[in-house]
Image (cartoon, coloured by chain):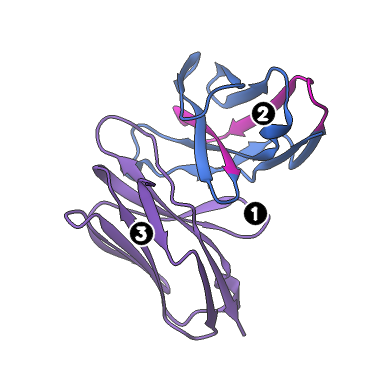
Amino acid sequence: DVKVTQSSRYLVKRTGEKVFLECVQDMDHENMFWYRQDPGLGLRLIYFSYDVKMKEKGDIPEGYSVSREKKERFSLILESASTNQTSMYLCASNTAAGVGYEQYFGPGTRLTVT
Amino acid sequence: KNEVEQSPQNLTAQEGEFITINCSYSVGISALHWLQQHPGGGIVSLFMLSSGKKKHGRLIATINIQEKHSSLHITASHPRDSAVYICAPKRGGATNKLIFGTGTLLAVQP
């Protein structure tokens, strides 16, 4: 089974702190994604990566950056956390070559910025 | 106007009922995913379909690309089906990006 893991289920940070969210997948997937999920807005794509060191902005990249130094790991960075970044963050991965491009999701990290 | 609209937003059903959740979209797509999210849980992909119908156990998904509409049906619903169901079309072309509906919150009462 595909497994996508995220470093924390719950995280509380203060305004202005630098925050790292880590995501690891064990299926050698080329593509990895970071989403945030907010009530009434659904999932929105922050960034995605289609290869090591390659990234592309999603719909809401402002205030975020990403890093993909190894194929299995995709990090989301909040350079200076703000209260409006309080949200559920979900990581996903898929293979570019696979049938259907099905995305596999991690369990999510609920981040609270105070 | 959202590119993906789901209806209903909230649905309460009695155990055993047949349930339908609808998804309409306004953009060209190459495929569509149905996702399930339990409270506090991660998201699981139920189906990916690009035409016709797919069935998995008590779940059936249909899509009509020309009409830009998809439905998810649950037969003989059970309280463990209670979850948020999310429609996520994949844009046409060489992209892996999905666009997401806001979800349908289903509660199945015993």
* Chief SS of the magenta region: strand
Q: Residue at (46%, 82%) from the top-left corner?
A: B76
- Colour of chain B in the rendered structure image: purple
- The numbered dot on residue A22 is 2
Residue A92 coordinates in the image, percent (x, y): 53, 38
Q: Give, as a single range, the part of the protein colored magenta.
A: A13-37
Mark 1 closeness class: few <14, some 14–19, many ≥20 residues within 10 Å = few
- The numbered dot on residue B41 is 1
Q: Are marks 3 and 1 on the same chain?
A: yes
Using the image, determine if residue A92 lies above or below residue B18.
above
**B52 or B88, which lies in front?**
B88
- Label 2 vs label 1: CA separation? 18 Å
Regarding mark 2 in the picture, which secondary structure is present there? Answer: strand
Q: Please identify the quadrant where the C terminus of chain B is shown.
A: bottom right
Mark 3 falls within which chain? B
Using the image, determine if residue A7 lies above or below residue B61.
above
